[in-house]
Amino acid sequence: MPRRRRLSEIERLTIAQERRNGVSAASLAARYDVSLKTIYNVVNHRDERQTANGSRSRVVGIRVSDDDLRRFDAALSRRGIAHRSNAMRRLMLAAEGVFLPDDEMCDELRSLGAALNRVGNNVNQIARRLNEAKVRGERLSYPASSHRDVRALAGLVFDLADQVQEMSRARRSVLDLEISSALAGFAGRDENGAE
């Protein structure tokens, strides 16, 4: 029985990677002058070793639009991150903190909602009084004080809108910091984490 040559560790890693990328076992066997069985053993042994070491044995696939991918790549580029897989892995590990609802923001939005309801009730009362006067054929009484009240209500609505926008900006900044923290340390690293 002819003796086949022994593969180096680098060759084994390369074979496992190329098999994952779809290169046929037959072409790898011919290129490295080994049997098909050797190729299969290399790949299976590599997978078993990764699983036993608790390393990455699962593949997660997602579909995204061209625009989604472009924006994600731009965000990674701004942070100096070269590989999507590293970024996704870190985001998955940080998901517990990043994707939790912001209780403080929820409370603020509830109180703003209540304030908007009060404004809506006041506007409805003004409209009802004006409509009643019109139906009775009375001259619409709309004194300067009513005009001031409506302006004050409009001002309150605009203030509430500004507060919601500011809360949104603040939450986005916090999320950006949390995501940046989750992705920290990957700038300039390769797929295996080497500089």
Image (cartoon, grey):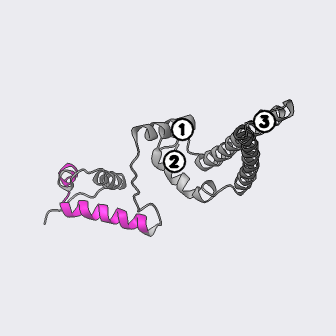
> Hey, which quadrant is residue 104 in on the image?
bottom right
Q: CA distance from mark 3 to mark 1?
A: 44 Å
> Magenta region: which residues?
28-51
Measured in 3D between alpha carbons, the distance from the residue under mark 3 to the one under mark 2, in whole angstroms, is 51 Å
Residue highlighted by disc 1: 75
Residue under numbered circle 2: 87
Q: Earlier in the sequence, mark 3 or mark 2?
A: 2
Label 1 environment density (alpha carbons within 10 Å; few <14, some 14–19, many ≥20)? few
Mark 3 neighbour density, 10 Å: few (under 14) some (14–19) many (20 or more):
some
Residue lying at 84% horizontally and 31% vertically, measured from the top left? 143
| Mark 3 touches mark 1? (CB < 8 Å) | no
Report the front residue among 86 and 172. 172
Q: Secondary structure at mark 1?
A: helix
The number of numbered badges drawn on the structure is 3
Q: Residue type at mark 2: give it.
A: Ala
Q: Mostly what secondary structure, the magenta segment?
A: helix
* Residue wearing tag 3: 150
Residue 193 visible in rendering:
no
**Residue 167: x and y, percent?**
71, 44
Which structural element holds mark 3?
helix
Q: Nearer the viewer, residue 180 or 34?
A: 180
Picture quadrant where residue 150 is located: top right
Choose between 122 and 76: the one closer to the eye.
122
Q: Secondary structure at mark 2?
A: helix
Query: Is residue 5 shown above or below 172?
Result: below
Furthest-right residue in view? Answer: 145
- Is residue 156 covered in magenta? no
Horizontal placement of 62 versus 115: left or right?
left
